[in-house]
Image (cartoon, rainbow, N blue to C red):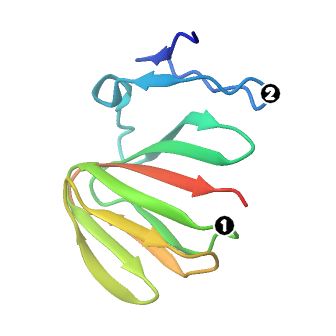
Amino acid sequence: MDTPTALGAASERMSMSEPRPVAADLATMSEFAQDGIISKSIVENDHHKIILFTLAAGQELSEHTASVPATIYVVSGAGTVELAGQAHEARPGMLYYLPAELRHAVRARDDLVFLLTMFRT
């Protein structure tokens, strides 16, 4: 039986050649850069990429697209997720599905933590 890889304050990245279970302590991994954005890869393999993002209040990921489908899951904080020009309130527990090539942006009103999952096809 595989033992889950535990992720805490020091981020570790899954090897693409050795997919294994992961147990991630998102609260411990969440840290903020003053007036900045931090991203930490949690899982990366041939099928998925899961990244923990922390945006300090007032920061944003400007509008862009991704070549693969993705989800955004808000862990904590408040802000706005914009999907194809439509603004949605970002608050803990919200999940957004983004088809490939959808224009999207994320803005942090307060310190914001979210998980981005990309589905490689």
Seen in the picture, residue 5 relative to 26 is either above or below; the reply is above
**Residues at badges 2 and 1 in contact (C-beta under 8 Å)?**
no
**SS assignment at label 2:** loop
Quadrant of the frame with the C terminus = bottom right
Q: Dot 2 corresponds to which residue?
A: 17
The residue nearer to you, when weighing 76 against 48, is: 48
Q: Tell me the quadrant of the picture where the N terminus can be found.
A: top right
SS label for mark 1: loop
Nearer the observer, 65 or 15: 15
Q: Residue at x 80, y 27 (%)?
A: 17
Assess disc 1: are there few (<14), some (14-19) or many (≥20) residues with their C-alpha within 10 Å of its C-alpha.
Answer: some
Q: Which mark is residue 68?
A: 1
Q: Which mark is residue 31?
A: none
Residue found farthest to the right: 17
Look at 46% across and 87% down and name the residue there: 84
Q: Position of residue 5 (x, y in %)?
A: 53, 15
Rate crowding at label 2 as few (under 14), some (14 to 19) or many (20 or more) other CA atoms within 10 Å: few
